[in-house]
């Protein structure tokens, strides 16, 4: 069997397909490189975010410890209870005055 001769149109099609394949492979290679660079950048950002988060939580823990140690807890609670008791006394007195005013009307 003899193969038929290749025409100039077929040669053009083969060349065009080869050029297109070369362009597509080049673009795919470039996309692969860019994707890798982007993923490395994201990994670095994630690592930095984790470090910042860790340092923030440690700083918050230190600040919380400092606040807890600055005023003893019992003393603070006693002060709050005393203030609440005083507010209750004031509210009762205001209520009594309100009743007196309503009776005198």
Image (cartoon, rainbow, N blue to C red):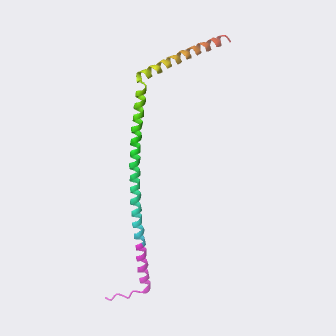
Q: Quadrant of residue 33?
A: bottom left
Judge by depth and name the residue closer to the eye, 17 or 90.
90
Number of numbered discs overlaid on the protein picture: 0
Q: Nearer the viewer, residue 32 or 18?
A: 32
Residue occupying the point 39% across, 86% down = 6
Between 43 and 18, the residue placed more toward the observer is 43
Along the line of sight, the residue nearer the viewer: 21 or 32: 32
Q: Is 104 one of the magenta-colored residues?
A: no
Q: Is residue 52 left or right of residue 101?
A: left
Residue 16 image point, x, y percent: 43, 78
Vertically, is 42 above or below 12?
A: above
Q: Position of residue 77 (x, y in %)?
A: 44, 22
> Is 92 situated above or below 65?
above
Q: Quadrant of the N terminus?
A: bottom left
At horizontal 65% and vertical 11% (from top left) the residue drawn is: 103
* Quarter containing the C terminus: top right
**Residue at the spot x=50%, y=19% of the render?**
83
Residue 99 horizontal/vertical position (percent): 61, 13
Q: Could you tell me which residue is drawn at 41 percent across and 44 percent down?
A: 52
Q: Residue 21 lies in magenta, yes or no? A: yes
Q: Position of residue 20 (x, y in %)?
A: 43, 74
Segment colored magenta: 1-22
Q: Residue furthest right?
A: 105
From the image, give the main secondary structure of the stretch colored magenta: helix
Position of 7 relative to 20 (above/below): below
């Amino acid at each position: 069997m003899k193969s038929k001769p290749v025409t100039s149109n077929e040669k053009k099609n083969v060349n065009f397909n080869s050029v297109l394949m070369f362009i597509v492979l080049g673009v795919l290679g470039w996309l692969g490189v860019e994707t890798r660079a982007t993923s490395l950048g994201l990994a670095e950002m994630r690592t930095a975010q984790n470090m910042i988060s860790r340092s923030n939580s440690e700083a918050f823990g230190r600040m919380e410890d400092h606040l807890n140690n600055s005023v003893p807890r019992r003393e603070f609670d006693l002060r709050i209870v005393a203030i609440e008791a005083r507010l209750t006394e004031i509210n009762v007195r205001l209520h009594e005055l309100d009743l007196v005013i309503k009776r005198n009307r």
